[in-house]
Amino acid sequence: MSGKIKRGIKIGLTGPLASGKGEVSNWLKTQGFDYVSLSDMVREALRKERLEETRENLMKIGNGLRAKEGAGVLGKRVREKILSDDENKDWVIDGIRNPAEIEELRKMENFFLLAIVAPKKILIERVKSRKRGSDPMSEEEIEKKLNREWGIGEPPDGQQVGACIGESDFFYLNEKSLDELFLFMDNLLKTINNNI
């Protein structure tokens, strides 16, 4: 990337399953960004409780944290981790799924929210082709998971990706090649750099 990027940029990622958040995170790491995920905070709490890392336990701990400390608890914990580690580093923050998390993360200087989306048909095909063990496999199961993530049938403190997308600073429709995605990201970093 040309031009020196100013330090202390925090790019939060939101978007549905298989939209390309992992690709963006990996690309940002090649640009010197440190990585943290909101689900890392749940895993940390799980380890403290000495529980096995199963999907059920992760959901139970995550729901428990939100019930006890509010819907933004994971965003708050990520913010505290960044501030205690080094807020002058560049950070990519993955797994933002609730507007209350955004509210907590916006308390940091130079925080920008990027929404990455793709048409549902493309998302379903990507999930089927990547064959991750944790992914649902039938089209019906994938669609159900996408709807739940979006916020359909979820409580206000649950997954609300649709509402998060509405609060984004930047938006990318990821339906073309990885090269185009990375070109967008290169231009996005230049835009951010010129405006902070």
Image (tube, rainbow, N blue to C red):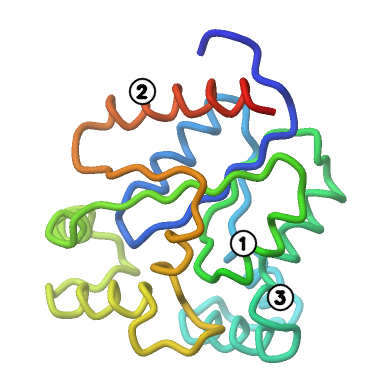
Q: Is residue 180 above or below residue 125?
A: above
User: What residue would you read off at disc 1?
Assistant: 102
Marks 2 and 1, how far apart at CA: 26 Å
Task: Quickly name the residue at label 2.
Answer: 183
- Going by the numbered disc 2, the residue's amino acid type is Leu
Image quarter of residue 134? bottom left
Residue linked to disc 3? 45
Among numbered discs 3 and 1, the one appearing first in the sequence: 3
* Residue nearest the viewer, comparing 58 with 68: 68
- Residue drawn at x 39%, y 40% is 23
Residue shown at 29% from the left, 60% from the top: 132
At a point 53% along the width and 20% down the height, the residue shown is 190
Q: Residue placed at 53% from the left, 8% from the top?
A: 2
Q: Foreground mark, 3 or 1?
A: 1
Q: Which of marks 2 and 1 is in front?
A: 1
Locate residue 78 relative to residue 165 in the image: left or right.
Answer: right
**Amino acid at the residue labelled 3:** Ala
24 relative to 19 in the view: left or right: right
- Mark 1: amino acid: Ile
